[in-house]
């Protein structure tokens, strides 16, 4: 069978389930095998959709199976999910086509299961969404977990924190396609100039509401094919993470340290803020990831970033109390960006959250030693879990009275309308939530080191 979008999706899904790699990496490396943009788009939708909705798909499929899903070969499970996803979520694909394509796909790798696939998927097509869901009033966590395809332990955490309605909205947003944001490189253009250029290249772009450099784009296609991308007029970066540079707000000529810099979106944004004058020390423990920082800086025309391989708990090579600004974009659970990483929800366990704060605090404390008196320290994560955010900040402040919180509202590039947000910001912290702010789940904290 030719390398079709469904064939490629089944291969990628099988490799993800076996733990071989991450979905976004496999898509990036394999989409080139499909020649047509619409085929690449379909393969991406199929992979991300089957991963995000896996629990719901399995629930619908199990109603028509005589044996557990786990007893079936990996490839058969993926073909069943692919077929069910098309039947339940993709209105533009006729049901008969979804079933027949799934059966044909099975003939190439699991011919013994073609009859089972045909029968089960036809019953899924007949049943549609008329499924016996758990009763929401009696089993709220199980209902939300199955209906919106999130692990039970995570739903329980969020349900206890926010209640049923708000949790359901967050789960729903996690399952939607993530918006694509880019950041204008102000060293070479401005947002309106970039927008006009992209329109000439067939890319629709709308200005963001929170960050003056941000544009929300659609129809982007292959980045390398865009002259504006090759010329370094922009880089891809979510709008919420673009806020970091505005909060740290380095000046031209400053010395800045980025403790966890790869892949370089925030690092290069800081350099643009500094008008490419001064110096940025960019650390990462993986040399290969630092090459991504260097390549991005080169494309954007930035020369002030100096990369250092090394553990962020050590930061060797930079003197203490020497930096005007320090950023700690800490390694975290990533539970604020589940809509961007389709397989992440199935890779995380609750014990992962328990282990991270100790690492995050160790990095924050070491980085804080690099901040000069009067300098600025910013801590950020892409998670919504308080243990990784508020609790880390609380522990840091209790041990470091020399750092005082700074009102975030004075540096954010947009105004805060919610009184809860304003109260947080006055204490130097802000938790952004998809269901409340329409952003990724993102946390920011800002401190100033007392003058001697």
Image (cartoon, rainbow, N blue to C red):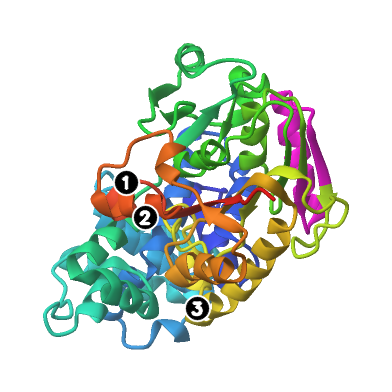
> Which residue is label 3 attached to?
349
419 w.r.t. 294: above or below? below
Residue at 18% across, 65% down: 165
Task: Please state the extent of the stretch shown in magenta in the rendering.
Answer: 282-307
Q: Which mark is residue 424?
A: 2
**Crowding at label 3, few (<14), some or many (≥20) Cα neighbours within 10 Å?**
few
Please identify the quarter of the rendering in which residue 315 is found: bottom right
Pair 1/3: label in front: 1
Give SS at disc 1: loop
Among numbered discs 2 and 1, the one appearing first in the sequence: 2
449 w.r.t. 269: above or below? below
Farthest residue toward the right?
317
Pair 2/3: label in front: 2
How far apart marks 2 and 1 lie (CA) works out to 18 Å
Report whether residue 219 is seen: no
Pair 2/1: label in front: 2
Residue 223 colored magenta?
no
* x and y, in percent, of residue 327 in the image: 64, 49
> Which residue is label 1 attached to?
438
């Amino acid at each position: 069978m030719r390398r079709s979008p469904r064939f490629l999706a089944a291969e990628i899904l099988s490799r993800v389930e076996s733990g071989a790699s991450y979905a976004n990496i496999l898509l990036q490396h394999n989409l080139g095998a499909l020649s047509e943009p619409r085929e690449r788009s379909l393969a991406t939708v199929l992979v991300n959709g089957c991963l995000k909705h896996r629990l719901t798909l399995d629930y619908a499929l199990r109603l028509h199976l005589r044996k557990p899903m786990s007893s079936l070969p990996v490839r058969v499970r993926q073909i069943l999910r692919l077929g069910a996803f098309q039947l339940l979520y993709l209105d533009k694909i006729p049901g008969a086509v979804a079933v027949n394509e799934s059966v044909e796909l099975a003939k190439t790798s699991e011919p013994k299961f073609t009859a089972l696939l045909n029968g089960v998927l036809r019953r899924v097509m007949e049943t549609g969404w008329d499924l016996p869901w758990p009763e929401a009033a009696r089993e709220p966590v199980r209902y939300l977990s199955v209906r919106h395809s999130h692990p039970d332990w995570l739903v329980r955490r969020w349900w206890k924190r926010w209640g049923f309605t708000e949790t359901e909205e967050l789960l729903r947003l996690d399952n939607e396609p993530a918006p694509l944001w880019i950041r204008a490189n102000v060293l070479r253009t401005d947002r309106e100039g970039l927008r006009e250029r992209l329109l000439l290249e067939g890319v629709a772009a709308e200005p963001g509401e929170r960050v003056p450099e941000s544009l929300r784009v659609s129809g982007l296609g292959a980045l390398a094919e865009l002259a504006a991308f090759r010329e370094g007029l922009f880089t891809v970066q979510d709008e919420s993470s673009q806020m970091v540079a505005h909060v740290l707000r380095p000046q031209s000529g400053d010395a800045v340290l980025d403790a966890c810099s790869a892949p370089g979106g925030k690092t290069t944004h800081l350099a643009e803020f500094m008008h490419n004058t001064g110096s940025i020390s960019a650390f990462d423990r993986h040399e290969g990831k630092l090459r991504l920082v260097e390549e991005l800086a080169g494309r954007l025309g930035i020369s002030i970033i100096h990369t250092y391989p090394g553990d962020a708990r050590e930061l060797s090579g930079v003197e203490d109390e020497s930096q005007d600004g320090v950023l700690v974009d800490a390694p975290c659970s990533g539970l604020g960006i589940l809509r961007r990483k389709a397989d992440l929800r199935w890779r995380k366990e609750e014990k992962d959250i328990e282990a991270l704060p100790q690492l995050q605090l160790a990095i924050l404390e070491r980085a804080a030693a690099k901040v000069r008196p009067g300098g600025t320290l910013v801590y950020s994560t892409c998670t919504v879990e308080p243990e990784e955010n508020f609790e880390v900040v609380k522990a840091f402040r209790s041990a470091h009275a020399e750092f005082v919180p700074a009102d975030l509202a004075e540096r954010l590039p947009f105004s805060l309308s919610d009184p809860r947000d304003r109260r947080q910001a006055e204490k130097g912290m802000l938790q952004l939530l998809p269901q409340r702010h329409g952003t990724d789940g993102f946390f920011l904290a800002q401190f100033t080191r007392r003058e001697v």
